[in-house]
Image (cartoon, rainbow, N blue to C red):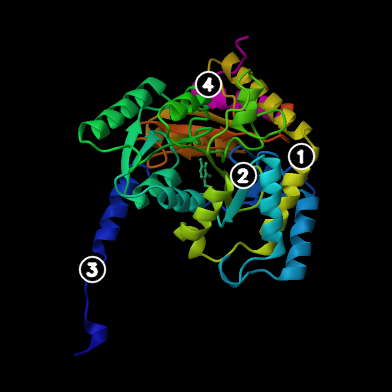
Amino acid sequence: MNYQEMKSDALGFVSSHLAEWRSKGLDRSHLSLEPVSHDKTGCHVICNGQKKLLLSSNNYLCLANDPRVVQAARDAIGKYGVGTGGSRLTSGTLPVHINLEKQISSFFRCESSLLFSSGYMANAGVIPAICGHGDTIFSDSLNHASIIDGCRLSKANVVVYRHNDMEDLEQCLLKWRSEFTSVGNTIGQHHGLIVSDAVFSMDGDIVNLPIIYKLAKHYNTPLMLDEAHSFGVLGPSGRGISEHFSNNGYPDLKADITIGTLSKTFGSDGGFVCGTHDLVSWVKNSARSHIFSTASGAGNVAGAAMAMQILASEQWRVAKLAQNISFFCSELVKYGIQANSQSAIIPIIIGDEQKTVNIAQELFESGMIVSAIRYPSVARGKARLRITLSCNHTKTDLDWAAWQIANTLYGYHQKIS
Ligand SMILES: *Cc1c(COP(=O)(O)O)cnc(C)c1O
């Protein structure tokens, strides 16, 4: 038998899937972006040799390239090396991990916290650690993919309620409670969990915390919120959704379990969970994505710690981001484009996938990078431009971007104000 001459098309199905995917305008590829030298704002990049305004980064407070953050990462790598060579529970824990966990607990005012290698891993690990077969998870229909995957891994029953619809959530909770009592079960044996993004990652809207909190208390079900897009963005000091509502007349509404990421506002990478001592100790002992994955490198951890320190002392960044959001939305509205976001995420819904890609491409050619978000990130037929702002965008940048977007969408040449 000559192995060289044996032919098979065992992976032919992959090529067919890909061809079909491409024909629907769903194919994506990686843009390679380089920094602009001497540009300290972090808002411009070089792509294919041309300078572009970046309107699609989650580096909301421009801390990823802050010289103090970069220096802290360098120092830590100099001292500890690049990789940790072990999981946290074996030999991968360094003083920088312990210190950052203390800093997170203190900054976000919780008893304890635990780092993961990413926000994705935090959700994929925490949810199965606290829910299993027979338990019921109530999950918002627009929750982030990492929450969805965490729910699937848990093998619990998953009840998906309509997006941010608290009446629907209450109906689901009522039904769950009555089913349990009708078969003689007690809810005590099997528990529930309500899980939601705090700021929804593709729509930029905010969870109805006062009501979801009340429902969680009323049905004695823990509440888990993912603050990936609210830390550093919501609340006057960037402490997130609780601070936002506290500032609007609802003090002390805290989730039982909070997930955060170091990859957005904190300009690094990694994720974390915050909660009580017992919750965190349990997660440490049972979350598989924590146990079976190598601890984050010292540079990223120390960089995130410095970014958190800067956030604590430079609240102007949060205020400036909020100003940019309201300015940019009002500019879009002047051009007749619906935009009303309280978060740094501003979606412009187009619908058709291919059309969205074409518009994003035109905008790219005009000098800006805006994401064309399509299935599977959002539902089919709900494709959109997704714009994210940072504290270092200037009025001139945003004024131009809004004009250019309107011009591309509708061919407007003049403000209709
Ligand atoms: C980005 C994001 C995550 C994942 O965080 P990473 O640190 O990038 O893995 C989790 N949840 C939400 C809501 C997100 O937007």
Q: Does the magenta stretch include residue 346?
A: no
Q: Indicate the amino acid at tag 1.
A: Ala
Dividing the picture into quarters, in which one does residue 243 lie? top right
Labels 1, 2: front one: 1
* Disc 3 CB within 8 Å of nearest ligand 1 atom: no
Q: Residues within 10 Å of mark 4 (few under 14, many from 20)?
A: few
Residue 399 position in % (x across, y down): 68, 24
Identify the secondary structure beneath mark 1.
helix
Identify the secondary structure beneath mark 3.
loop
* Disc 2 CB within 8 Å of nearest ligand 1 atom: yes
Identify the secondary structure beneath mark 2.
loop
Left or right placement of residue 207 versus residue 78 in this view:
left
Q: Mark 3 points at which residue?
A: 10
Labels 1, 4: front one: 1
The disc, 3 or 4, on the residue closer to the chain's N-terminal end is 3
Left or right placement of residue 237 versus residue 191 in this view:
right
The disc, 1 or 4, on the residue closer to the chain's N-terminal end is 1
The reply to whether residue 349 is visible in this rendering is no
The CA distance from mark 2 to mark 4 is: 33 Å
Identify the secondary structure beneath mark 4.
loop
Q: Indicate the amino acid at tag 4.
A: Gly
> Residue 196 bears which disc, if any?
none
Q: What stretch is highlighted in magenta?
A: 396-417
Q: Name the residue under label 2.
A: 264
Q: Indicate the amino acid at tag 3.
A: Ala
Residue at 41% x, 49% y: name it.
150
